[in-house]
Amino acid sequence: MLDQLTNRLARVVKTMRGQARLTEENMQSMLREVRVALLEADVALPVVRDFIASIKDKALGEDVTGSLTPGQALVGVVQRELTTLMGGDLPDKERELNLATQPPAVILLAGLQGAGKTTTAGKLARWLQTERKKKVLTVSTDVYRPAAIEQLKMVAEQAGAQFFPSATGDKPVDIAARAIDHAKRHYFDVLIVDTAGRLAIDEAMMQEVTALEARLKPIETLFVVDAMLGQDAVATAKVFAERLPLTGIILSKLDGDSRGGAALSVRHVTGKPIKFVGVGEKLDGLELFSPDRMASRILGMGDIVALVEDVKKSVDHDSAQKLAKRMQSGERFDLNDFRDQIAQMRKMGGLSGLIDKLPAQLAEAAGQVNADDTEKQIRRTEGIINSMTAAERSKPDLLKASRKRRIATGAGVPVQEVNRMLKQFEQMQMMMKQMKKGGLAKMMRGLGALKGMPGLPR
């Protein structure tokens, strides 16, 4: 996510921090680098101009206090201005999803065809159910593409939300009227309305979505924009903002854009807050947008809060507690437990998902590891464990030469791979033993034993 911009700005930040004092010359040089980084990331030129002017204005009047060097102070100014650019100056209430109305709260999704509206509708339905405990109904008013209606039906089912049927012969406004009536009669908390899109903005589309907005009077009218559009995203957002009373923006496919200019431009051009960002294909790939955390991420400072949230969402707490109790009662950490730990890591997005949220220096060290090779190694490890019998997984001591040969054949790997995996397991087993005895120092010594594991940096 935002790789190109992050890498460039992280280098600039590193240079800034090293400055003992700021002069007109070195500040101009750094701001030039920031400007080039933003333009290369496809940030709109007017946005870049305003941003650089604001940084310059604030930096010249910045008091350097405490242990901060002038370079560090400038980094602070850049971070604050970047946060403001993405909506950090708005009250929290404006940046949050507003559902404070007589149910059903209607959420209207608008945008161009291919922006990811239908997938976003499913992701939003899932988020509302898991995070807000709401009963959600979805409906498609895209009567021009039968596949769009079927797609929403499928996505809604996967998200665990209800779907209100519609057909290509119906009028969008009539569909919406029936859907809201059904939502009221069946006590739904939220109605998500997926609208039709076009390959480009046209008057018929704008009139249709305007009529839907007037009929539904949604509490949230969200513009879904493909982050990979770059400059085009800004122009599209501007037109929609002029014709619709938008309340917010959802940036879809942000993980597919190494530039990220749309994230910085859209809010500035429309004046509307970015409320969510879509990442990945899975239905749980919708994140609340946080300007300050995104600014830290772009500047190479990482997003530890997001990392912790991923852990909380992905970790099976019941399984973790059962494992802890078993370890405390004296049971040994076995290969079933080892496989479970690997599965938990994969649920968090694997190594690449972890690296994306680390601060730049840690990410750079971890980035020396080939994430694809590591993912393959993890899948291979799971394959080896799955080729064992239940008894062998529970009692690894049973694994002698003949059994190892059989497992290697079943997993399609050399026997050496099986031996390597068992060595990793023994190292993890040692770490779990240290953790059971208590003490952070002992645990860290246990972690030190893992330094030779394939795929991990030394």
Image (cartoon, helix red, strand yellow):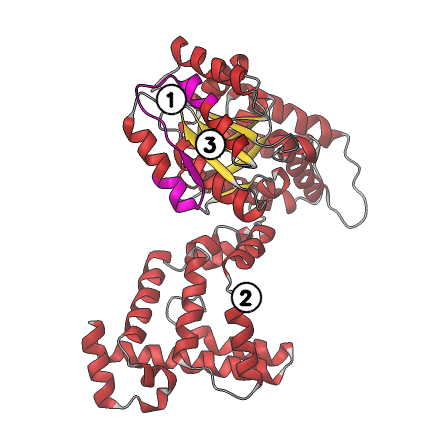
Residue at position x 33%, y 21% in the image: 143
254 and 131: which is toward the camera: 131
Residue at position x 33%, y 20% in the image: 199
Query: Where is residue 165 drawn, in percent x and y?
Result: 37, 31
Span of residues in magenta: 154-177
Label 2 Cα neighbours within 10 Å, binned few <14 / some 14-19 / many ≥20: few
On the question of residue 140 being in view, the answer is: yes
Residue labelled with disc 1: 197
Label 3 Cα neighbours within 10 Å, binned few <14 / some 14-19 / many ≥20: many
Note whether 383 is above or below 139 in the view shown.
below
Q: Of helix, strand and loop, which one carries label 2?
A: helix
Query: Where is residue 173 drawn, in percent x and y?
Result: 44, 17
Q: Which of marks 1 and 3 is nearer the N terminus?
A: 3
* Tag 3: amino acid: Ala
Q: Which of marks 2 and 1 is nearer the N terminus?
A: 1
Residue at position x 44%, y 39% in the image: 162
Most extreme residue toward the top, as rendered? 203
Residue 205 in which image quadrant: top left
Mark 1 to mark 3 CA distance (whole Å) = 26 Å
On the rendered structure, is 301 left or right of 449? Answer: right
Residue at position x 48%, y 33% in the image: 251
Most extreme residue toward the front, as rendered? 185
On the question of residue 11 being in view, the answer is: no
Inspect the magenta stretch and tell me whether residue 157 lies in it: yes
Query: Where is residue 343 drawn, in percent x and y?
Result: 41, 65
Residue labelled with disc 2: 317
The nearer-to-camera label among 1 and 3 is 1
Q: Of helix, strand and loop, which one carries label 1?
A: loop
Image quadrant holding the C terminus, namely bottom left
* Tag 1: amino acid: Gly
On the rendered structure, is 375 left or right of 76? Answer: left
